[in-house]
Each structure stands twice: as structure tokens, then as C-alpha cells.
Image: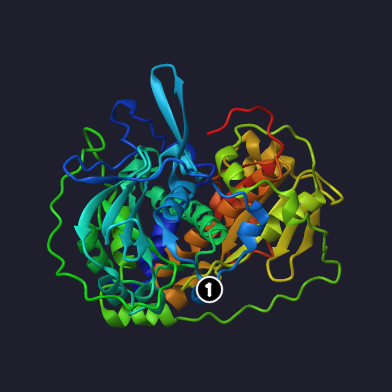
Amino acid sequence: MGNDYIEAARVFHEITKHSYTSVRSSPHFLDWDNKPLPYKIYPGAASVALPRDLNLSSTPTLAALSSYVPADFSAPIETAALTRILFCADGLTRHKRMGADDYHFRAAASAGALYPIEIYVAASDVEGLETGLYHFSPADLRMAGLRRGDWRGYIAEAAAKRPSILRARAVIAMSAIYWRSDWKYRARAYRYCYWDAGTILANLLAAAAAEEISAEVITAFGDPALEAILGIDGEREGMIALVALGHTDEPAAPSPPCEPLTMETIPLSSNEVAYPELVKIHHESQLVTVEEVAAVSAAKMDSVQHSSSANALHLETITSEESAGLGETILRRGSSRAFAQEAITAEELATIMAASSEHPQADFPALTDTYLIVNAADGMHAGAYYYDRNARAFEMLKLGNFRGEAGYLCLEQPLGMDCSALVVYMADLERALNALGNRGYGDAHLEAGILGGRAYLAAYSLGRGATGLTFYDDDTTKFFEPHAAGKSPLLMVALGIPRSRMKS
């Protein structure tokens, strides 16, 4: 029925909620012999080898997270700089052999380490790279050539002639291959694909800022046009977001005709399972006409005036120079598998929250709110808090030791109980849907993923750990009521001191 039929998002959200009963009444057993391949491979495509001498940025991570590069001041893009950005976003950072299996770990966090996100690059003004459309392969740091020519004009037409795309030096397109995440998470995987895209964007935006290259995230575009240029079907693989990278005074040249892309890819597994509920919500969130794209692109949301408590806590933060360099942080980052039930400092928590809470340069408005359960932070009382992203202040909601509740809410995982603080990103989905239609559902989860990904980077830059978690939906809302009444949890990120060096 289309993007305006917001009952579709309401229904999907309800049927994919976790509860104490649902996780016990509908168990899911993983078919390890059918686990999907984590890479998309075009065996017949000519490919370009990217530079391997990366020389990753030493810019302090906190500085990279807080930097804004105006488009007019954006630096030229060389192939080496583009490679550093792509590697920091989704590169293969390490792999381990465990028993009979190889585990590959990427630069950004991924739910279940399943990596459903694919990255394509439309390069138009990248020094050392032929103009054309490519697919990025993190496995071997190469780009498969898909189409020759300047495709900015075509992509901009699909995005309501977005100026940042028309003048971009390169445009990044991000899609999700749903089966990779479906294999473990079934229909709820649709949410997780947006989280994963968000954590990749957090890394990408920080890496672009470190290179002094402007970057804008765009989610209002005509899906069928972009599916056609990428050669994806919109059911098995669907569009998530665009990023306009860099700025040039040269306008986009006319794009070639978009002929069907017939390149074959290697099957991910012997049997792919489609979940109709996921396919349906993606179809109902698609924008098809130019008018739909323009309306969503121009949509505004009235800001909710929140009067902070007179007792709101404003804390000192750590200077950017005290954080590790971005390249070091990217290589160090993982997902902590256990926390030590030790305290971080209030200044560390305040720094992580401040560094991760800025709304990205994007075509959608701020949609998420931030709540926390603070278990142990020297200089703060244990309890539940609301974090005011604008005022950079913590508002106490209730005082007390809630380790047990934190552990229960994140599906009874010890990580929530043992961490120093559990960050909970929430949204009033009705406001998002009323403003943006079903598109707002994905946008809210994408923003939560970006903020959560930034929290990861900030934490690891300070020598702390982080991990993303899922949750019991309605129980989480009830815990933070009445302040969070009407809001839905989107993502949890646990912060703290890792108990071991094992990461994923």
C-alpha cells in the first residue's frame, strides 16, 4: 500500500517484539551447514586492487567524532583516502581460526557478526580511480567494476536532485542482504540490518572527517531506480542509505543509460529462506515516485520541548587529545564478551555520551532519545537516567541499584548486569511514522545504530569496552516510564571494563 500506510510499520514492530514468553515459545535453531557466506562475490567482474599501505589516521577519535566538514571546504579525494574510509567503515580487521571454522572480524560492530551490509561506490572525481560504479569487497580490499561512467546524475534524480549528490566526488550506496541476518534473527533481522548500517556509518563519518572530506547521509530516494543501477531485487537485497562524499565545483555529467546489470554472484548458502513479514515492511517503506521522495526529503518534525530537571547533572568531559587515534581505535574495536563489574569514571561516561550524541549530517531529523541504567560510575549515583542530547546533561529518573533489571531487560544476558552503564536508544515511533511514513521506521533504527556505533568508538578510544544488545521491548519501555511512555527501544549498548580479551 506504500510508504504512507504506516499501519504496516506498526504491525511489523509488534510482531517482531521480544518478550519473556515469545523467546521461549518460538525457539529458533541455527542450521550451521546453511550459514550464509559473509561476502558478496562477483566471479566474472574485473576488479581494482585498492592500496594496502593504509596509514590509518592518527586524528584523536573524539575529535573525528565531533568534527563537521562543510561541503565547500572538503578536500579532494585520492584513492588512498577513499580506501582508508572504506576500510574504517567495513574493512576486514582480523580473523581467527576456532576449531574447524574461520571467524572474520570487521571494522564496525554487527549483530551476531553476520555482516549483512554491502557497500557500492559511484566514483566520479577520485584521483587514481576510473569513473564508474563499483562494489567494495572487504575480504581482499578490492573493488569489482560494475558500470563505467558518471552515475551521480542518475542517483541524484532518484534522490530528488539532492545537491550534495550532484556535487559529490563519490557517492556510497549501502544495501542489506537480508538472508545473512535472517539466518539467525528471522524477521526481526530487518531492525538489525539498520543497526549494522548505522555502526558502519558511524565509522565512515568519523573516517571522512579525519580526511577532511564532507559526508552527508541520505535516506530519501527512489528505491526502484537505485535497485536497478545496483542490480539488486529489493526483496533479497534492499537499499538502506546513500552517502554523498566530498564536494566538487564540477556538475554531474549526464549519466549513461541504465541497462540491466546481469553479473552473477556466488550463492550465499545452499538454501536461502525469505521471511514474508520482512519483505513486506521493506516494500511498504519504499519510495517510488518523485513526489514521494521530495515529500520525505522535506519532512520536518516539531521538536519536543523537554524541560530538564533543575538537578540535571552536567559533568566534565575528557579532552579529545586524551583519546586514541582513530586508526588505532578502529583496529582495537571489538564487542566485549564479558564485563568485570567494575566502575568507569563519570567523566568517561559523560565523554562517551557527548561524543556519540550529535545528530549526523543527514536528510532526516533527529528521531531518537537516550536513556541509561548506570550500574557503576565513580562520581555518579547508580540509577536510571535520561540523557539530554542537546544540553549534554543526565537527568535522574530513579535512584538505586538496577543491575538485575539491566541484565533481565537485555534478554537476561550477564553483559547488561555486569557492565558499568547500559545505554538504551529509544524513539517515539508514532512521531517518526507520522512525519516520514514507514521510511521513518528504518531511519529511527539507522540513527540509533549511528549513535551506538559512535559510543563504541568513543569507549574504545578511552580504553574501555562496548557491546550491542537486544532486549525485551515492552519491559524496557515500562522500566523507564513514565518518562519514556509511548517510546520504543531500538538498540542497547553496554559500556564498561572488559573482563577478558576475547572480542568479536
Q: How many marks?
A: 1
Figure quadrant of residue 206: bottom right
Q: Amino acid at mark 1?
A: Phe
Compared to residue 364, the image places residue 117 above or below, namely above
Tell me the residue at 61%/36% (across/down).
Answer: 336
The front one of 446 and 168 is: 168
- Seen in the image, is 88 located left or right of residue 499? left
Q: Residue furthest top?
A: 99
State left or right for residue 317 relative to residue 216. Answer: right
Quadrant in which the N terminus appears: bottom left
What is the x, y in percent for residue 214? Answer: 50, 67
Q: Position of residue 297 (x, y in %)?
A: 41, 78
- Its colouring scheme is rainbow
Q: Which picture quadrant has residue 41? A: top left
Looking at the image, residue 405 lies above or below residue 304: above
How far across and down, in percent of the image, does residue 247 sit? 43, 72
- Kindly state the secondary structure of the residue where label 1 is placed: helix
Q: Which residue is nearer to you in this view: 452 or 206? A: 206
**Residue name at image x 72 percent, y 37 percent:** 497
Residue at the spot of label 1: 73
In this rendering, does residue 480 appear at all? no
Bin the neighbour count of mark 1 within 10 Å (Cα to Cα): few under 14, some 14-19, many 20 and up: few
Residue at 42% across / 35% down in the picture? 27
Q: Residue furthest front?
A: 128
Side of 491 where 83 appears, left or right: left
Residue nearest the observer in this picture, 47 or 111 = 47
Q: Is residue 166 above or below residue 17?
A: below
Evaluate whether residue 138 shows in this view: yes
For image coordinates 32% across by 32% down, the residue present is 35
Q: Position of residue 269 (x, y in %)?
A: 25, 34
